[in-house]
Image: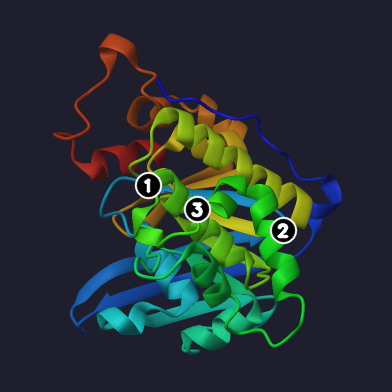
Amino acid sequence: MTQTVEAVRPTPAAAAAAPLLSVNNIEVVYDDVILVLRGLSLEVPKGAIVALLGANGAGKSTTLKAISGLLKTEDGEVTRGDILFDGQRINGIDPDKIVRRGIFQVMEGRRIIADMTSLENLRLGAFTRNDREVDDDIDMVFKYFPRLKERTGLAGYLSGGEQQMLAIGRALMARPKMILMDEPSMGLSPLLVKEVFSIIREINRDLGVTILLVEQNARAALSVASHGYIMEQGKVVLDGSADELRDNEDVKEFYLGGAGDQRKSFKNLKSFKRRKRWL
């Protein structure tokens, strides 16, 4: 059974503030042919955790890559719409410049450097910085992830949970304003999922880091998020507060397993039928 952690809600002042990230009606095409995102829009307020949910192939990871500038590595391109971060347009900017502006993506599958030590991986996260406080920030990462301090060997020998912690710690080393997290619970046991999501909540609360969270484990994601979006076939079909989404009957049926014996086969039901119900 999936375990959840207590939700954190933004203050009214934070909720009323202008969004840190605005994705406005973007389309993404791969190889000049394949249309993946079809007019997607979303907003992420400063200091919030926002969940982006949906089935495999909905376009969630493509959305994160569009924001972080990584589409070019896969022959992808934002062909329409704008992505604004802190009030400035960032589509078309190189990924390293986006990192310098304050966005860091924790990739699906962790993507740690297996033949480097944990400490070397953490220092790699600070590649955009040129200050004397890197060692202090390493100590800060070890405060959140004390297990990493004990693991002095190559990162490839870490467990899946430890590698996920290292990937998040590496992101913190960039001192980001915003972290994009792609499937942080993938491959983890329920106990480790609970631990990782508790740490995500602490990082958001203690450091004020804004988080856009892509996650298959909808129950865990909505337990820490203040707001959520649900995607189908490259578009947002439903959004609302975490409480509203948890109480929505369609969300319960298709993502939270709350339909009991009346639940339909998710695999055999065409997505447009779900979208018709939500729209």
At a point 70% along the width and 50% down the height, the residue shown is: 143
Q: Amino acid at mark 1?
A: Gly
State the residue at coordinates (13%, 34%): 268
Residue 170 point in image, percent of width and height: 55, 65
- Disc with the residue nearer the chain's start (3 vs 1): 3
Q: Residues within 10 Å of mark 2 (few under 14, many from 20)?
A: some
Q: Is residue 250 left or right of residue 95?
A: left
Q: Quadrant of residue 253?
A: top left
Q: Secondary structure at mark 3?
A: loop
Real-space Cα separation, disc 3 to disc 1, in angstroms: 13 Å
Residue underneath mark 3? 151
| Relative vertical location of residue 23 with respect to residue 59 in this rendering, above or below | below
Name which residue lies at 49% across and 28% down.
248
Residue 152 position in % (x across, y down)? 50, 58
On the image, numbered disc 2 is attached to which residue? 140
Mark 2: amino acid: Met
- Residue 226 visible here: no
Residue 116 lies, in percent from the top left, at 41, 70
Q: Residue at x 63, y 75 (%)?
A: 85
**Considering only order in the chain, which callout, 1 or 2, is on the residue closer to the N terminus?**
2
* Quarter of the view holding residue 112: bottom left
Q: Quadrant of the N terminus?
A: top left
Which of 59 and 199 lies nearest the eye of the viewer?
199
Q: Secondary structure at mark 2?
A: helix
Reading the image, the residue beneath label 1 is 160
Residue 96 makes an appearance in the image: yes
Type of the residue with mark 3: Arg
